[in-house]
Every structure is written in C-alpha cells, then in structure tokens.
Image (cartoon, helix red, strand yellow):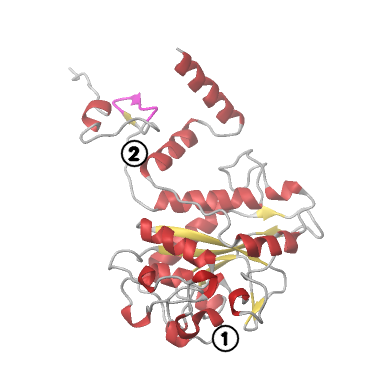
Amino acid sequence: EEDLEEARQCREELVSKGIYGRYRRWLSRLVTTRRIVIVPVANALGYYRNTPFEGGNNNNDDDAILDPNFDFPYDIQNNNNGNNNQQQGQCMSTIAARTINEIFRQHMFQSGISFHTSFDNTKNNDKEVDEGVYYEWGASSYEGYSAPDEFSMREISEALSGYGGEVMEMGQGGGRDSYPVVGPINNLLESNAGRMEDWAYAGSWDGENIGTCNPTSNGGYSESQTKYDASTLRSFHTLVESRSASSTNFEDEAKLGTTADLFTPYGTGNGHISRNIRLSLSMIDLVEPYVKVLGVDGFDIRDDVIPLMPRTEHSCRRTKVMKIPEKS
C-alpha cells in the first residue's frame, strides 16, 4: 500500500506540471527502452570563460588556445581553417574532445544532438550564424556534396525543429524566435576539418578521411584511442545553434520557459529551454521505431512500459499477455 500511495502522489505531481497519462507513458517508454547519455557541458572551461576555446596562453604549447569543435580526427588532410588542433596529428588536444571520444568508445550511439550557442551578428567565413538545426556534411572534403543519408537527415531535422516549436519574444518589437534554418552544415555554416558531427557519422566507414591523433597537450593522449572498428562511429548527429545568454539578455527568466505545458510547442510555459527539451525528446523517440498497443477489444491498456520493472528473456509472455473472452 505504501508503494501505491507513493505512485499516486508521483502521478499527481506530474499532472500538476502538465505531464498527463499519455505523456507519462511516453516518457516511461523512452527511459526504459533507450540508453540516454548526457554531457551537460563538454567544454566546462570555455563555458566558464564565455568562449568556445579551451586553454588560454597562445605563447605556451601546453596552454595553447584550442577549439574542441574542430578537434576530431576527420578530414585532417583538408584542414583549411588554420586550426592548430589538426596540425601534425595534434587532434584530440582538448579535454572536451577526449571526453566525448571516450564516451563513444564505450557506447554504440545511433543518434545525438550537440547544442551550441549562437551570437547576434556572428559570422563564419562571412556567413551569418543563425539559430537552426544543421546536419552533415560539414567537412571540407564534401563541400558541395550531399551526405548519403541526406534525405532522412533532413526529414529528422525538420521533425526536431517542428516539435521544438517557436518562442515568442517579449522584447522590442515582439517577433518570433525559432529554429528557422534546417540544412547541411557546409551550406549554411562553414566547411571545417575535425568536426565532431562528421567524425561521429562517418569515422568508421569513410577511411579516406579518418586519421589518428597523437597530441602532446594536456599530458598527451594515446594514438590507440583514435583507432576505431567498423561499428563505433556510424551515428547521426545534429548540430543545434541555440540561443545564448549574451545574445538574448536573459534578465527575464520567463524567456527560458517553465514546466507548464512542456510538451506543447506553443504552450504557456514555452521558452528556450522548453524548446530544446522537446527537441531532445524527439531525437530520443526517433532513434528506434516501435509499435504501441493502445487497447484490445475495447479495453484500454494504461501502462505499456513500466520503468524499473525487471525485463528478462521472454518476460513479455508473463507481463504482456491478455485473455480476451471469445465473442458468441
């Protein structure tokens, strides 16, 4: 009885936050049937300093300014951005890139999102950096080419942007703050060597553009850690340029959003964080197709997947079996 009462109180609390039965069951499925890995701040030092770089003293090799965004062993031979990380095998120079690399070596990811901050009037090679959902290619080798999975990449990215929705700006002149841009990184941002998204997507099958790293910074990093098998790096990763505190001036915390109507793109609690939560949930949902049985012979199935319930071989035969009286 104590467990039932605790469950009842939990559900009531969820309802008070706008998480009704169908959403609760959806979240139950996601957390039960997927492994979700979150890196809150990969480049903690850069975040603290409000810069994309890691390190700070360019006159000292050990403290050189390094950019984790372009620190991965992909498209190294076509380094065209003057990125010191990619010179002479010095990729994986940053702690941020090594952290991500170790996580990928431990898990076989199918999809993911890397959130970046965008700043007003920021440009990459004379291109405005707009809020948007971007996908492969971003590598210099494939400038002007579409990725083999471009069609599905666009379909998924548009779905993410659509469920993320738009945020109404309450500031000067009103207007809508949304993810208006969806498309390849090369077309809309810039081509660069060493992008994480390209590395995560093609690092296991595009042998001509994958290399190894043997950096000397931060105590060095074994070259063996950048040798991958045929399965490790075959995931679809989107790059989301989101809003930053600098470009939005978040003095009004309401712009960040609340938990109210969290699953509704235009709900009362909508905001920048709410939008990115919905976008993330979309990617988690889309990672694997599934069929859900809503009811049988007029009987509603209320709990399709129950979190923390032990799932052993053939357990569905015991937990998912229903006896239906034969109609006369």
The magenta-colored residue range is: 296-303
Q: What kind of residue is marked 2? A: Lys
Please rate how many residues cluster around mark 1, counting C-alpha atoms within 10 Å: few if below 14, some from 14 to 19, many from 20.
few
* Residue 219: in magenta span: no
Helix, strand, or loop for circle 1? Answer: loop
Q: What kind of residue is marked 1? A: Gly
Residue corresponding to mark 2: 292
| Residue 270 image offset from top left, x and y in percent | 65, 46
Q: Quadrant of residue 181?
A: bottom right
Residue occupying image coordinates x 24% and y 31% = 315
CA gap between label 1 and label 2 equals 51 Å
Query: Looking at the picture, does residue 104 appear above or below residue 74?
Result: above
Query: Looking at the picture, does residue 17 appear above or below residue 54?
Result: above
Can residue 244 be seen by looking at this rendering? yes
Query: Looking at the picture, does residue 216 appear above or below residue 321?
Result: below
Taking depth in this image into account, of 210 and 307 the one nearest to the observer is 210
Can residue 243 be seen by looking at this rendering? no
Residue corresponding to mark 1: 82
Quadrant where the N terminus lies? top left
